[in-house]
Image (spheres, helix red, strand yellow):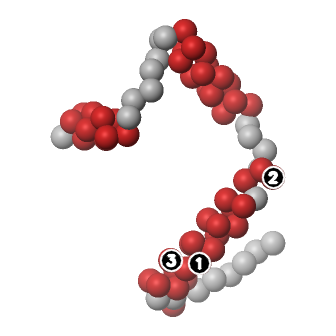
Amino acid sequence: MAIELQIDQLSLEEKLQIMEALWEDLRTRAGEMPVPQWHKDILDRREQMIETGEAKFEDWDSAKKRIADRIS
């Protein structure tokens, strides 16, 4: 199905409204989307690392600071 939109003719507000509608639709239908096996494998490995103590959770403020320090 090809959809032709003339995006360049939309206002910024219209574009944002379309994006919000798309994200809402995707969010409500997330359970319908298949999850690739490699995603599952990564999540399983991360869960295992938490359980064995190889990895730990970090609060969001600390993570943002660590990332900002790394890129500055």
- Give the quarter of the figure containing the C terminus: top left
On the image, the x and y values in percent for residue 7 come to 55, 82
Q: Is residue 28 above or below residue 58?
A: below
Q: Please tell me how crowded label 3 is: few (under 14), some (14-19), or many (20+) other residues with Cα within 10 Å.
A: few
Residue 38, position as x, y percentages in the image: 68, 30
Q: Residue at x 58, y 86 (%)?
A: 6
Looking at this view, is 57 or 31 the one in front? 57
- Left or right: 29, with 56 as reference point: right
Q: In the image, which disc is placed on residue 18? A: 1
Of mark 2 and mark 1, the one earlier in the sequence is 1
Q: Is residue 28 above or below residue 64?
A: below
Q: Amino acid at mark 3?
A: Leu
Using the image as rendered, state which of residue 63 and residue 2 is in the foreground. 63
Residue position for label 3: 16
Per the model, the C-alpha gap separating discs 2 and 1 is 21 Å
Task: Say if 24 sits above or below 37 in the image.
Answer: below
Q: Quadrant of residue 34?
A: top right
Instruction: Evaluate whether residue 38 shows in this view.
Output: no
Q: Which residue is mark 2?
A: 32
**What SS does tag 1 mark?**
helix
* Three-letter code, disc 2: Glu
